[in-house]
Image (cartoon, grey):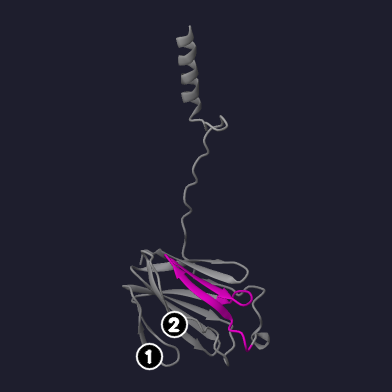
Amino acid sequence: MRRITLTLAVMLMCACGAANSANGLPAPATASPVALTCTASGAASPLWPAVPSASATTPAIVSAAADGDTLKLTFASGTPQFVVVPVGSAHFTVDPSGRPVDLAGASGVRIVLRGFRGDVSNYIGPARLASSGPILLETGAIGDFEGVVSFGAGVSRPACANVTASSSTLTFQFIASGN
């Protein structure tokens, strides 16, 4: 009789699915990863200062950091208008000099940020940032001229970026594209 009861109990547990031994409830389903899509552009946030009221003493871009396949730009206030453009190589030219800049990678992505002061340096951080991602290999500041700031990204294969904006940060997650 005990064997039949034990067998029925095991069958009931198997039919109901695996249980979490801590609380007897079914184990939670694992979330499937969300597919990221390319972001072509974005508008300035409401906190982004109008050019005449922007500080002339504090750079608008507080920091830039590359980690894995991510470039994170932090701003003094709000986030600017941006455009993300995949390009065919990791060869860029500096605005306005036209000086060549070759970044690590077989392909590239240009990030153009608008709405800055044109009479000050808007980014004074490192000119180049190496990264350890399988896609993002290196980023470089390639322009700060007439209110437009540009970064180039050297990537291992054709790529684009999924952009997330927070109160004062733009995060560019580089993803492979079908180019």
Q: Which mark is residue 177?
A: none
Image position of 32 (left or right of 42): left
Is residue 87 found inside the magenta-colored segment of the image? no
Of labels 2 and 1, earlier in sequence is 1
Highlighted range, magenta: 56-81
Circles 2 and 1, Cβ within 8 Å, touching? The answer is no
Q: Going 49% across and 43% down the picture, which residue do you hit? A: 30
Q: Which mark is residue 99?
A: 1
Quarter containing the C terminus: bottom left
- Mark 1 falls on what kind of element? loop
Q: Closer to the camera, 120 or 2? A: 2
Residue 33: horizontal and vertical position, in percent?
47, 51
Residue 10: horizontal and vertical position, in percent?
47, 20
Residue position for label 2: 127
Q: Closer to the camera, 153 or 20? A: 20
Report, in whole angstroms, how far the alpha carbon at label 2 lies from the one at label 1.
Answer: 14 Å
> Residue extending furthest left?
106
